Image: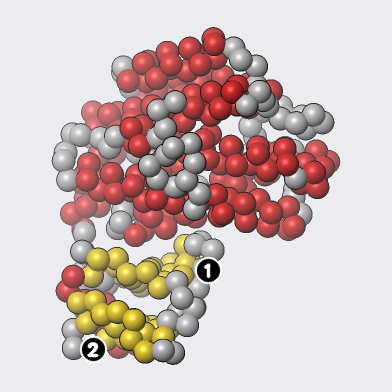
Amino acid sequence: MEVLELRNQRSRLSVREGQLVISDDGGVISRHPICATEMVQVYGNPQITTQAVKECLKEGVRVNYYNVYGKYLGRVEPGYPKNTQRRLEQYRVYLTPELRLAWSREIVRAKIQSEKVEVRRLQEQGYAEKSPSIRKELEEGLSRAAQAENVANLLGIEGNCARIYYEAFRSALPEGVTWNGRSHHPAEDGLNAAMSWAYGITAMEIRSAIERHALDPHCGILHEPGYGSGGLTYDLMEPIRANFCDHVLLRLIRKDRSLRKEIRNAGDGTLSEAAKTTIATKLRESMEEKRWNQKYNMRELIGEMARGMVSALNTPGQPPSWSEMLPAR
């Protein structure tokens, strides 16, 4: 099944003889059989005819709307949508303790793997102390997570590894930028505000991938359903917090003096619109960059993580191999 994406602001989607037709001022760009279309993704202001929307509803094709930056706005959903079975399997994973634990183990293992890789990078770049004990403790956390007996035990392992990782992250901050640890709702300082903003920008990209694959963003596995803007969104955020969000933000703070100064002086945890724009622009640029000999850039990796979840839902009992998609070292 095909997912159509409309990103060209001059494009137009219409329907002719059972086909969805994408065109612009220069004429027809492509044709797509509606019976083979799963979803239509609209970014910004491309036009869709009323007839095309009605035909999509008739054929069970969802139309998702985003702003030009990828923030999910809402959807037009048919009364009898496709992929109902996929969502039923997603709910079954959450409701079955053994399955939820197996999937949660993989989420936490992927997160710890990401933290371990980022610590290694910070140490090699000379930003963090080259302490072998830090990486050893994270390695031990990986092993313990794979054997966790319940979700509560798993969250304890996750929290301990996060504490170890954040110690290395703190030591890599440039001179003058102090940080007392992660806080949010509300952020207690400028760095926490910057981190929350970076996570929010990345969450929009993840939410887009989740909607694109007809998964329920509000039904998390590790995170409880309904958490924040979607439990599943934050589940898929965990494996990339350290080696993408934190990495890009730290690199930007070290290079951009004006942003560094604002973060240092933002004692009330608020950032200017200019600072937010700087962070958002850098994150979106970095989404398209492929580094560290990775197979995918970050946007591709997020898509692969969502596809991995869909494949796993089709194989009951086998969680996605998210940790294997991340850099190994």
- Where residue 232 sits in the image (x, y, percent)? 39, 45
Taking the spot 68% from the left edge, 43% from the top edge, the residue there is 252
Instruction: Identify the secondary structure beneath mark 2.
Output: strand
Does residue 170 appear in the picture of this structure? no
Taking the spot 71% from the left edge, 27% from the top edge, the residue there is 180
Task: Specify the quadrant that holds the N terminus.
Answer: bottom left
Identify which amino acid the numbered label 1 is placed on: Val
Q: What is the tally of numbered marks visible in this picture?
A: 2
Which class describes the residues within 10 Å of circle 1: few (<14), some (14-19), or many (20+)? some
Does residue 41 appear in the picture of this structure? yes
Identify which amino acid the numbered label 2 is placed on: Arg
Q: Which residue is mark 1?
A: 68
- Where residue 265 sits in the image (x, y, percent)? 83, 41
Instruction: Identify the secondary structure beneath mark 1.
Output: loop
* Marks 2,1: beta carbons within 8 A: no
Taking the spot 37% from the left edge, 15% from the top edge, the residue there is 144
Residue 235 vs residue 168: left or right? left
| Residue nearest the viewer, comparing 73 with 14 | 14
Residue 30 vs residue 6: left or right? left
